[in-house]
Amino acid sequence: MVIIMKTGASPEEIAEVTHSIEREGFTPFENPGVERKVIAVLGVIHSHKLQLVDKFQNLPGVERVALISEPYKLPSRQCHPQDTVFEVGGVPVGGKTLAIFAGPCSIESEAQAIETARAVKAAGANFFRGGAYKPRSSPYAFQGLGEEGLKILAACREETGLPVITEVVDPDDVEKVCQYADFLQIGARNMQNYRLLQRVGQARTPVLLKRGFGTRLREMLMAAEYIMVEGNHRVALCERGIITFEDSTRYTTDINAVPVLKHLSHLPVILDPSHATGFSRYVGAVAKAGVAAGADGLLLEVHPNPAEALSDGPQSLKPEAFASLMRELARVASAVDRALPEQGA
Ligand code: PEP
Ligand code: MN
């Protein structure tokens, strides 16, 4: 349920509505910074729904009360009609300028990371990505450098000025990762790790939530709710491909997810064509499709020497290929009234 206040409702009227929600045993959530105040009523409404609607409807300053049919509320566009834009290290996520998260799948060494960070910055990325804790399908595969990788990421930020994003896989690591990273990534395999979602929700570092490869968008929005209800509202949603019967690519890009998520939610939507396709030769086409479909940004794996990469080499772009893709993306972006970040800015 959301309560839409009249334009110009007074602070006293708003306070009365929030007290009234609390008196009924629910938690009010006020969306900040919107021209017409919308107050969400959080909690499970088991009975007397219509009486509650009536009661809230009759309070002074209330324009109308709307029932939200979906079980997720905080990520819902019904609860927050405008697109959310938030800043991370001075870089906006959402809004006209696309967020381009680029870098290697894994941080392998300081030299590899710094070289890649410099290259992606020069080509116009506005975030540097790199995994320090890698959730690998095989326990024998490279698991990441751990805290050493986080230190290298921080050094890359120091070197380039780009804010850095990295995955956190263990709820007990959240605090440590927040000391080094500007943005936390929740990987596909952990989208429904509810303890982890709660912990990143308690942190104040923004979160990129990747879609589980076998989950519905509704479940992804419920995962976002887990984070937001803990107080962290800087969440971006990332489509990264789902498992289908098609096996000529690693996963299948659910391009529909972009307009569907934009319709259902106010949160920024990012597309990851690297994991979705699994092959560098397809990444550019799907990246362009994502921007044309309305994505607010892209996550792209870039490695100076993909053949030697310790993870996800086949889908990683060489720096030159990334730079040339960025030039093509600029043209697609301008066709849909978006823009790439300024190069090297
Ligand atoms: C990654 O970004 O390197 C990664 C492991 O992605 P996903 O969780 O989408 O597989
Ligand atoms: Mn990867």
Image (cartoon, rainbow, N blue to C red):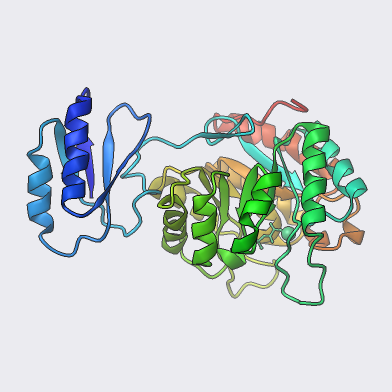
Residue drawn at point x = 52 percent, y = 32 percent? 95
Can you see residue 27? yes
| Rendered image quadrant of residue 309 | bottom right
Q: Quadrant of the C terminus?
A: top right
Residue 145 position in % (x across, y down): 82, 59
In the image, residue 245 lies at what x, y percent?
A: 59, 75
Height in image: 170 above or below 332?
below
Instruction: Give 125 or 7, whichever is nearer the viewer.
Output: 7
- Which quadrant contains ligand 1? bottom right
| Residue at x 42% of width, y 60% of height | 222
Q: Nearer the viewer, residue 242 or 104?
A: 104
Identify the image quadrant of residue 91: top right
Q: Is residue 259 left or right of residue 123?
A: left
Tell which of 13 and 247 is nearer to you: 13
Q: Is residue 105 visible?
A: no
On the rendered structure, is 50 left or right of 257? left
